[in-house]
């Protein structure tokens, strides 16, 4: 059993700040190299939720970046210049190994940049492909996936954490029953499930 340290607000806030700095460093490196990307995953959910209610933001450890597979070599060069280290690691449920970028040799996979490939399925059982990098918008410090593309990706993946993220979006009014007509049937059924049980 690990040794448990006393609760420390400074350690908690430092961890949140480390994720933010990692995201901004990666975004700056990709922007400087002209590599198209968009922030997706938990940080994208947090960014969208913060536009409505900062107190409802849920923190996340890793940074998910949407890239075109063809741009991976250029992204690798840009991110390695910024101090990240490229690795390919096995990932449960994925069709292929996952491309990640560790923030230094002592860092763990959970703290890494995780690459999600645009226009592909991350897992074979996903009903629709991931968003395209063009489905991103300028969020000031980084490129952020559009809300519609983010919701599609979360409904397609539909793991436990995706359902939590969808409920976060629902809780601040960013998604509601009005979204149902614009979704394909499989995703519509999944959103109906979230709407029927908003507390999970």
Image (cartoon, helix red, strand yellow):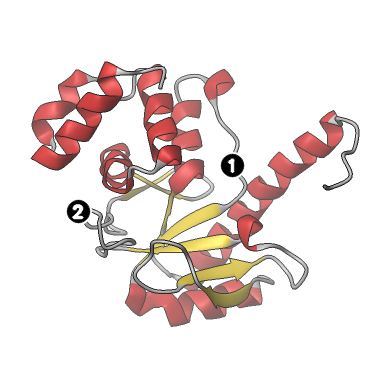
Q: Residue at x 65, y 71 (%)?
A: 84
Residue 172 in view here: no
Q: Residue at x 57, y 76 (%)?
A: 87
Residue 77 occupies quadrant: bottom right
Q: How crowded is mark 1: few (under 14 residues within 10 Å), some or many (20 or more)?
A: some
Image x and y of residue 13, in percent:
76, 35
Image x and y of residue 193, in percent:
25, 26
Q: How crowded is mark 2: few (under 14 residues within 10 Å), some or many (20 or more)?
A: some
Q: Which of 59 and 134 is in front in this view?
A: 59
Q: Is mark 1 on a helix, strand or loop?
A: loop
Q: Dots 2 and 1: beta carbons under 8 Å?
A: no
Is 123 placed above or below 169 here?
A: below
Is 72 placed above or below 193 here?
A: below
Q: Which of 165 and 16 is in front in this view?
A: 165
Q: Is mark 2 on a helix, strand or loop?
A: loop
Q: Mark 2 to mark 1: distance in Å?
A: 24 Å
Residue 87 in view here: yes
Is 159 placed above or below 111 here?
A: above
Q: In this view, does 4 lie to the left or right of 92?
A: right
Image x and y of residue 141, in percent:
54, 47
- Residue at far front of view: 1
Residue on which disc 1 sits: 60
Q: Residue at x 23, y 57 (%)?
A: 129
Is 167 placed above or below 29 here?
A: above
- Of the numbered discs 2 and 1, the one sitting upstream in the chain is 1
Q: Is residue 65 left or right of residue 11?
A: left
Image x and y of residue 90, in percent:
50, 71
Q: Could you tell me how many numbered marks the image carries? A: 2
Residue on which disc 2 sits: 128
Q: Residue at x 38, y 76 (%)?
A: 71
Q: Is residue 27 left or right of residue 85?
A: left
């Amino acid at each position: 059993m690990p040794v448990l340290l006393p609760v420390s607000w400074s350690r908690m806030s430092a961890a949140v700040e480390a994720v933010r700095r990692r995201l901004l460093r990666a975004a700056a490196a990709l922007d400087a190299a002209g590599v198209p990307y968009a922030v997706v995953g938990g940080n994208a959910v947090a960014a969208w939720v913060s536009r409505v209610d900062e107190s409802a933001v849920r923190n996340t450890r890793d940074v998910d970046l949407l890239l075109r597979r063809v741009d991976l070599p250029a992204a690798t060069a840009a991110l390695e210049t910024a101090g990240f280290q490229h690795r390919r690691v096995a990932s449960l449920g994925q069709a292929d190994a996952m491309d990640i970028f560790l923030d230094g040799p002592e860092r763990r996979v959970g703290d890494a940049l995780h690459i999600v490939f645009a226009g592909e399925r991350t897992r074979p059982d996903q009903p629709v492909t991931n968003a395209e990098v063009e489905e991103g918008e300028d969020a000031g410090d980084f490129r952020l996936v559009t809300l519609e593309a983010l919701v599609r990706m979360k409904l397609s993946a539909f793991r436990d954490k995706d359902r939590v993220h969808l409920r976060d979006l629902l809780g601040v009014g960013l998604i509601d029953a009005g979204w149902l007509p614009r979704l394909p049937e499989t995703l519509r059924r999944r959103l109906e499930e979230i709407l029927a049980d908003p507390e999970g």
